[in-house]
Amino acid sequence: MGRSFQADDAVESYIEQLIKSGQWHIGLVVGQLTSNKDYVARLIRTPDPAEDEVSEEEEGEEVVTEKKKEVCLRPKSLDLTDEQWVSSHATQVNRMLLGGLDVIGIFALAPPNMMQSSQAKLRQVVFAVHKALSKLTLCDRDNAITDRMVLQICSVARKLTCRTFDVADMKSTARPAEWRYVSGLLDRWSQLSTVVSVDVTITVPKDTRTTSMHKQIQQGIQPFCKSIYNGMALFNGELRKDDDVLDQSEPRKGKSKDRANPGRQQFAVDLLVNMSDNNNVPDPSVLSVKAILKVRGQMIGRSLVNSRATVRDAIEAVRSDVVRSLVSRCELLCEDLEVVEEHGARELYDTPVRVFTTVPKSSLAFCDYMFQDEKTKEVTERLKELLDIDVTEDDLELQCERHAEEEDWSSGVESEDGTEHSGGSAGARSGLGAFLGMAVSGVVAAVVGVAYMMYGDS
């Protein structure tokens, strides 16, 4: 039996808007895959490829660079779609998803003849998207679902055809899947919130080959990410059984039109990671290094899970959100910087802060990452371009995180006696055996920062 997808009724309205545009479209399907049912939260149209026209004009002794309107490079037909362009869009959207949400497939809207001639291309695109996103995964998930959807929408007959491919098998063939709309699907989803402290020291040995800062950070934070996936979680301060349904509030009764909206269930989550076994500490060794990186700070995590999610599902969503957020910040920082270090140099870098927004007239939320020198208008424009949603600056939740200040760094540097002191309460022992609490509740998180110290031959 094929997979069964439940789609929020807002998806139907979005499809109608795309049909009225009179053009063919290709894009991403965002939702949640589970062992029982699958959920579609939103379709996101992939923007047309574009190339900026830039001109330079001289004003006195200064050269002014002026950005003119973009030159549209839209293919003439669906079967001419560049799968790398869609994959690139998928990696950018992936950063903007809350925990529990993933890119679970692609969709295409076109007239019958164009759709028929594009079957091979659609299969190629869905595999390319999976390959691009799998490169971002630092830790493999247990029992990961590898089916991905291809939703085909006939712009003439308005007929939907839903199929899935097993992207773990390159020889996989299309399998039919069920599709139906559910009114208010997202309204009863639960929101999970956490604050996590990060304090990772990364050493770069002298005898290693030259690698980029991005690669150094990616390899360095991998043990931290694994500890998150191997840890435990408390929900509203309570340790619960994995197989329990997370939301145990009373279901609404009566006809749907008579039901009052009870509001979204909120859970505060404390992540606990397993402490190292002091009985198996390796012997100390001397390591000659050419650089040390410190990734330190606190960050906000948010996740969404469906109304039938178990505690295990919720823990997985929170874990994936924390890891994805940390990886995204470091990637964006490295993309923003061209690191040129000299011997003995020390540099401090602020990663971007996390900004949240809710889709207008919806219960669905997304996020973005904002550097200190960026303006809120740039964020709203990016949300429009990448997520195809119209939000104003007033719709942005900007105060969840703040940029790190100088005292944040000084609170965790080495003292004169050579010992290191870290600020915050993330190092407090928990009462659950050998587990270390990673959460700092009730504070505005300082964004994760990176300290990069180079060492010379001395």
Image (cartoon, rainbow, N blue to C red):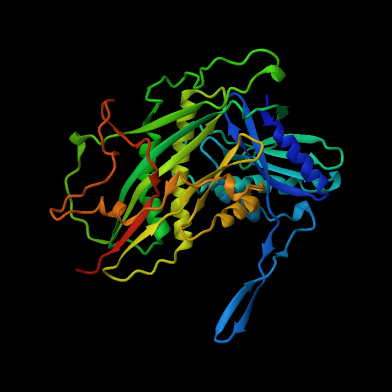
Q: Is residue 450 above or below residue 141?
A: below
Q: Is residue 403 left or right of residue 200?
A: right
Quadrant assignment, res 342: bottom left
At 75% across and 35% down in the image, what residue appears?
12
At 31% across and 57% down in the image, what residue appears?
406
Residue situated in front as seen by the camera: 290 or 27: 27
Q: Is residue 168 visible?
A: no
Residue situated in front as seen by the camera: 407 or 181: 407
Q: Is residue 363 left or right of residue 373?
A: right
Counting from the top left corner in percent of width and height, residue 54 is at 64, 73
Quadrant assignment, res 239: top left
Q: Quadrant of the N terminus?
A: top right
Q: Is residue 317 left or right of residue 177?
A: left
Quadrant assignment, res 19: top right
Q: Is residue 31 above or below residue 118?
A: above
Q: Is residue 104 visible?
A: yes
At 58% across and 22% down in the image, what residue appears?
262
Number of marks in picture: 0
The residue most toward the left is 417
Counting from the top left corner in percent of width and height, residue 24 is at 79, 49
At 69% across and 37% down in the image, what residue appears?
173
Q: Quadrant of the C terminus?
A: bottom left
